[in-house]
Image: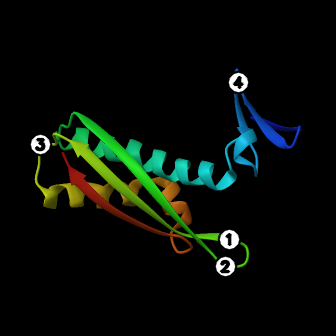
């Protein structure tokens, strides 16, 4: 990966793919959006892995992150992950256990542990 500054944005070159990063939404993804997406995406991958290991099936999963920023430098202080499961085959108590286990084994969540609070909620439809 390499980053190139061009026309008020950074372009991350990753193999044959590009990602545009900018402080302005109209010219790229904002850094806090990428950070939040990395946390949610890593957690989501681990959640799916744990569900497969425990033979918990579902037809769909959506994660909606909500970022809380505070202070003069707008530091991310909290990321709340809300999961919506479509037709999941287990109890709410088991879902809580699977989520807790996924949080424990997600490298991105563990990297911010102690500096950013990561919370969760879930629903089923």
Outermost residue, front side: 26
Say which element carries label 2. loop
Residue at the image position 68 percent from the left and 71 percent from the top: 74
Classify mark 4: residues with Cα within 10 Å, few (<14), some (14-19) or many (20+).
few
Q: Disc number at residue 15? A: 4
Residue identified by numbered label 2: 71
Percent of width and height locating residue 100: 30, 61
Left or right, 25 with reference to 114: right
Residue at the image position 75 percent from the left and 40 percent from the top: 27
- In this rendering, the answer to whether 10 lies above or below 83 is above
Work out how far the residue at label 4 is from the one at label 1, CA to CA, in angstroms: 32 Å
Percent of width and height locating residue 77: 56, 72
Closer to the camera in the image, 117 or 112: 117
Q: Which sits earlier in the primary sequence, circle 2 or circle 4?
A: 4
- In this rendering, the answer to whether 76 lies above or below 108 is below
Classify mark 1: residues with Cα within 10 Å, few (<14), some (14-19) or many (20+).
few
Say which element carries label 3. loop
């Amino acid at each position: 990966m390499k980053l190139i500054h061009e026309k008020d944005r950074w372009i991350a070159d990753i193999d044959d793919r590009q990602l545009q990063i900018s402080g302005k939404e109209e010219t790229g993804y904002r850094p806090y959006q990428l950070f939040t997406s990395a946390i949610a995406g890593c957690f989501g991958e681990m959640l799916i892995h744990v569900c497969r290991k425990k033979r918990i099936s579902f037809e769909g999963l959506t994660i909606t992150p909500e970022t809380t920023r505070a202070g003069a430098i707008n530091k991310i202080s909290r990321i709340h992950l809300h999961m919506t499961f479509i037709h999941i085959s287990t109890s709410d108590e088991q879902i809580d256990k699977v989520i807790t286990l996924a949080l424990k084994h997600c490298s991105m969540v563990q990297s911010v542990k102690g500096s950013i609070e990561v919370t969760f909620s879930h629903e089923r439809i």
